[in-house]
Amino acid sequence: MNFFSHLYLDAYGVNIYICPYRRFDQLWSDLKLPEYKLNKSTAGHCARTGNKIFILFNENHLQPGIIAHECSHATSYLFRDILECEHDNNTEEIYSYTLAWLVEKVNQTINGELITHPEDLYIIEENIDYQI
């Protein structure tokens, strides 16, 4: 299975990458990010650096619960770390819509309905504070 998607949320200036573990190391390197060690024995993982969120999956564990779990982390990164917006009663509805949208995009990516080519979409910014 070969899936990859790059989503750019223009309103927030955020890049979201959806990919299997086996493509993560090359993607991270191509984006010229600091070294990051990924534990590839887990079913899924979500990582963030600057305005980039990576939703990663072990291709042998693409269950709905794992997809929702990793998308929940991605939504938290978006709201808490990038938008600096707390998840509370005032943001519950937009948080839930964002989570549902991400789950849909991951499913479309895995099913081959939403495929992008990373070589055409890399946006490499300078002077970003890369934090993991």
Image (cartoon, rainbow, N blue to C red):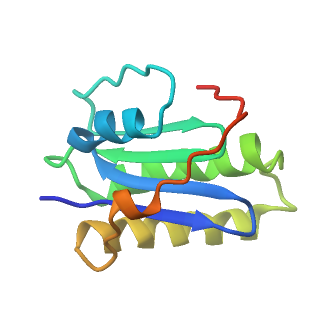
Position of the C terminus by quadrant: top right
Up/down of 85 relative to 89, above or below: above
- At x 40%, y 36%, the residue is 28
Residue 87 picture location, percent across and down: 77, 50
Q: Position of residue 46 (x, y in %)?
A: 46, 40
Left-right relation of 64 to 86: left
Q: Is residue 89 left or right of residue 60?
A: right
Q: Nearer the viewer, residue 92 or 61?
A: 61
Image coordinates of residue 121 in percent, x first then y, are 45, 62
- Count the numbered circles shown: 0
Residue extending furthest toward the bottom: 113
Quarter of the rendering containing residue 104? bottom left
Look at 67% across and 50% down and name the residue there. Answer: 78
Q: Quadrant of residue 99?
A: bottom right
Q: Which residue in the rendered view is the most extreme toward the right?
A: 90
Picture coordinates of residue 1, whole percent (x, y):
12, 59
Residue at x-position 34% and y-position 25%: 38
Q: Nearer the viewer, residue 109 or 67?
A: 109
Task: Work out whether 39 lies above or below 72.
Answer: above
The structure residue drawn at horizontal position 57% and vertical position 55%, both measured from the top left corner, is 15
Horizontal arrangement in the rendering, residue 5 relative to residue 95 (left or right): left
